[in-house]
Amino acid sequence: MESPNGAGSNGPPSFDLEKLKKDSDGSMSGMATGLFNQVVQGNPYFAAGGGLMILGSGLALARSGVIRLSGLLYRQLLVDMEIPSKDKSYLWFLEWMAKHPHRSSRHLSVETNFIQHDNGAVSTKFSLVPGPGNHLIRYKGAFMLIKRERSGKMIDMTNGAPFETVTLTTLYKDRLLFRDLLSDAKNLAVKAKDGKTVIFTSWGPEWRPFGQPKAKRLLPSVILDKGIKNHILNDVKEFLQNGKWYFDRGIPYRRGYLLYGPPGSGKTSFIQALAGELDYNICIMNLSEANLTDDRLNHLMNNIPERSILLLEDVDAAFNKRSQSAEKGFQSGVTFSGLLNALDGVASSEETITFMTTNHPEVLDPALMRPGRVDYKAYIGNASPFQVGEMFMKFYPDGDKYCDLFVQRATALNVQISTAQLQGLFVFNKDDPQAALDMVETLKSPNHVF
Ligand SMILES: Nc1ncnc2c1ncn2[C@@H]1O[C@H](COP(=O)(O)OP(=O)(O)O)[C@@H](O)[C@H]1O
Ligand SMILES: [Mg+2]
């Protein structure tokens, strides 16, 4: 098995000096070449190692070449667009993509919105949007790679949410599609709002739309006592037409309205209908919310989305706290002075319309009634005979012959009836005015369950 150059030899490589001399004509360079040939070609270790080395470096070269080439191609042939989460189009884009039919995404992420209603109930809405990760979509024949990623550990201090970006990559030739895509996404968002009212609720220190925009509530669907609706509507319209007057005189361009009265009389519904009528959105803030602080209220009131009415529900909550905190110790919530400061501090280049509602006007501090805080107040009470008749006719347009009798009987009960109660009775007896008439007695108990 011992052979000088043979395969399987375990000893050090040996050289055939005689052969070397013979092949090289005795010159030094010739000898070196011969030596090299013997060592490299004649020796299996070197031959194999050298081959591998050449192969390896070749591959490495090729690899870096490919990387460089792809980098070059990437720069030359691909374009990307980045949408940071702070940008308005960010949510539009996610919504658009959730609805886009040609996409492959396995990572979905859920966006949950919730709202707390006056009665304490919480409703929740989920929407599925593309989650962090890579997604591929096809848009107008072009492929686009979408990458949604969190930016490290950075957190948006204003809302505690991680910063995110969405990066869209496509071929250079399709770069103009980005603009189309963004305007499609925007149009989708705008169309969803067309003829609708967007309801914003507070989410930490910022306003976020609650669920999908809602169909506008029509003003005629809210029945208030004679003349009230028109009086308020005209006042708001006049305010909106007089921006220049305010600016010329250096007066903050804002107006506050207070609607007070028993629950279920249509205060909230009227404000929503008014927003729809004026084509405004609405920002709802409940002052009785436990984790609302003065700072947050102030911040929110100074950062209202454009064309929005600010609706502060249960303003009396800010006034209760003072007496409660004396007896019950510290309670988080808005203080009276916090509310006044926030109202006074609202400085916006746009108009600010604030509506406040309360069921307990008696606990409000007179300091709230100063111009600039509350400029207009209206009592929205329980149903008057006029409202009972109007409500009846709204639900039973063909029921005129029962209407007068219904109003008579309801009035004869001699109790306070809220419009919400009437609605309950009429909804229970859909299309049956006779049945509603027969059940008029149920209006005696405000909490009657049908
Ligand atoms: N004046 C009214 N006209 C029409 N619907 C009313 C009226 N008052 C109450 N409702 C109905 O009763 C419910 C509660 O009304 P809401 O506006 O929340 O009352 P409030 O804010 O005064 O407590 C709503 O479903 C609304 O449609
Ligand atoms: Mg209300």
Image: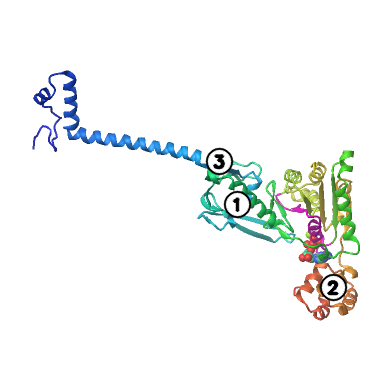
Q: Is residue 382 left or right of residue 288?
A: right
Q: Is residue 374 visible?
A: no
Task: Count residues near mark 2 (Cα–Cα under 10 Å), then give few for <14, some for 14-19, many for 20+.
Answer: some
Q: Is residue 18 visible?
A: yes
Q: Amino acid at mark 2?
A: Met
Dot placed on the residue nearer the N-terminal end, 2 or 3: 3
Label 1 CB, ligand 1: below 8 Å? no
Residue drawn at 89 percent across, 43 percent down: 245
Q: CA distance from mark 1 to mark 3?
A: 22 Å
Work out whether mark 1 precedes mark 3 in sequence or the reverse, and give the earlier one.
1
Going by the image, does 26 lie left or right of 87? left
Apparent side of residue 30 relative to residue 230 in the rendered image (left or right): left
Quadrant position of the N terminus in the picture: top left
Q: Amino acid at mark 3?
A: Lys
The residue labelled by disc 2 is: 393
Q: Is residue 263 magenta?
A: yes
Label 1 secondary element:
helix
Labels 2 and 1: the sequence-earlier one = 1
> Could you say which is closer to the camera, residue 390 or residue 260?
390
Q: Which residue is mark 1?
A: 94
Disc 2, SS = helix
Q: Residue at x 87, y 74 (%)?
A: 410
- The crowd level at tag 3 (other Cα within 10 Å; few <14, some 14-19, many 20+) is few
Does the magenta segment cover residue 442? no
State the extent of the magenta-drawn residues as a range.
Answer: 262-291
Residue 299 horizontal/vertical position (percent): 73, 43
Image coordinates for residue 122, horizontal then vertical, percent? 68, 60
Q: Which mark is residue 153?
A: 3
